[in-house]
Amino acid sequence: MLFRSTGQTVFVVGSGPQLASVRGHVLDRLQACTTIAVNKVFYRFRPTYFLSSYVGEVMLATRRVPDTTLLHMRDVLGPPLVPGAIPLRRAMFVPGMDLPRRLNPADPTLLTRYNVALGAAHLAYALGANQIVFIGVEQRNQLHYWHFDEDARLEIRAALVERGDPDLLRIDHPYASLDRDLAALDRSRDDCMQPFFSIDHTPTFKAYFEIFARNGVDVVATTPESVVADAGARVVRVEDVLADSGVDSLPAAGPSPTAP
C-alpha cells in the first residue's frame, strides 16, 4: 500500500554517474528519508519505493530489496506479475495536462513520457511531497553509476544471470532479454558517451516543475549538470538538502547494500 508523506521531502534517485560519487554515509542518511528509486539504484542503497515499467527490473528488486515497496507500472492495470509488487497504470503526459495530486485507488495512474524519472516525479507529487529532490537524474549520456563501480557492475551481472531469460521479460517489451541486459551492462564508458535518448526530455520536466511550483512544491537538483537543472530546478548539494531537512540529526536507517 502507498502511503502519503504529506509535507515532507521526497527524493527521486536515478542511476546516473552522480550516484557513484555519493558517499556511503550520505546513502545511509537517505535511508531515513522517503525515496523513490528507478533503474538499478537498489544495488547502491535501499529505497522506500522502487518504480519500473520493466518486469525484469522488478524481479531483480524483489530479490535484492524485498522490504522495499515495489511498483510496476504498465499500460494496462492488472494483477501483479511479480508476487509482492504493486501494479500501477501508466499514461502519456502531453503538454497542457495537469498532474493529479492524488492517485485514484480504483485506477492508480502515473503520468510519464518515455522516461521513468517523470513517473517517479509524479509519484513523489502524489505522495504529498512539498519538496522533490533529484539525485542521479542527469540524462546527459548513457553512462550509469556502475560504469564507475566495477564491484557493483559485477554484482548486477551475476544477479541478471541468476534471474535468467524467462518469457515474462517480454510481456510489455518484446525486445527485453538477458542478452540485451548484459550487453547494456557491459558497454564501455566510451561507448556510452552518446545522447541519453533521441527525445529531449527537458520541456516535459519543465512542464512538471511548473505544475509543482503552482502547488507550492519546491524542486531541487543536486548537480547542475542534469536535465532537471536545465528544466528549472534550483541546485543544492545533497548534503545541504539533508542538513536543511534535519536528516543529519536522525539515526541512519541501517547500512546501505553497498556503502563505500
Image (cartoon, rainbow, N blue to C red):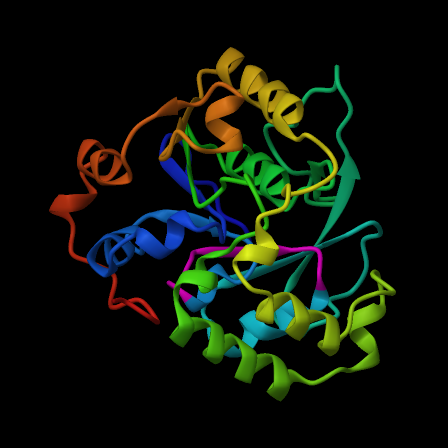
Q: Position of residue 61 (x, y in %)?
A: 55, 70
62 vs 6, left or right, is right
- Viewer-proximal residue, 218 or 152? 152
Q: Residue furthest bottom?
A: 162
Q: In terms of depth relative to the viewer, which is nearer, 141 or 157?
A: 141
Please, which residue is most extreme toward the top here?
214
3 lies left or right of 174: left
Disc tally is: 0
What is the quadrant of residue 139 in the picture? Answer: top right
Question: Which region is colored magenta?
Answer: 44-54
Predominant secondary structure, magenta span: loop
Quadrant in which the N terminus appears:
bottom right
Residue 152 percent across, percent down from the top left = 42, 72
Q: At which x and y percent is residue 102?
A: 60, 33
Q: Is residue 245 above or below residue 206?
A: below
Q: Nearer the viewer, residue 188 or 238?
A: 188
Q: Looking at the image, which residue is at 54% across and 50% down?
A: 2
Any part of residue 242 in sight: yes
Left or right: residue 241 compared with residue 51: left
Relative to 128, does residue 146 appear above or below in the rendering?
below
Foreground residue among 177 and 249: 177
Location of residue 55 by image quarter:
bottom right
Quarter of the picture holding the C terminus? bottom left
Residue 149 image point, x, y percent: 39, 67
Left or right, 73 with reference to 45:
right
Name the residue rendered at 87%, 65% in the picture: 174
Q: Quadrant of residue 106?
A: top right
Give the vertical position of 205 relative to 114 (above or below).
above
Q: Residue 108 magenta-drawn?
A: no
Magenta region includes residue 46: yes
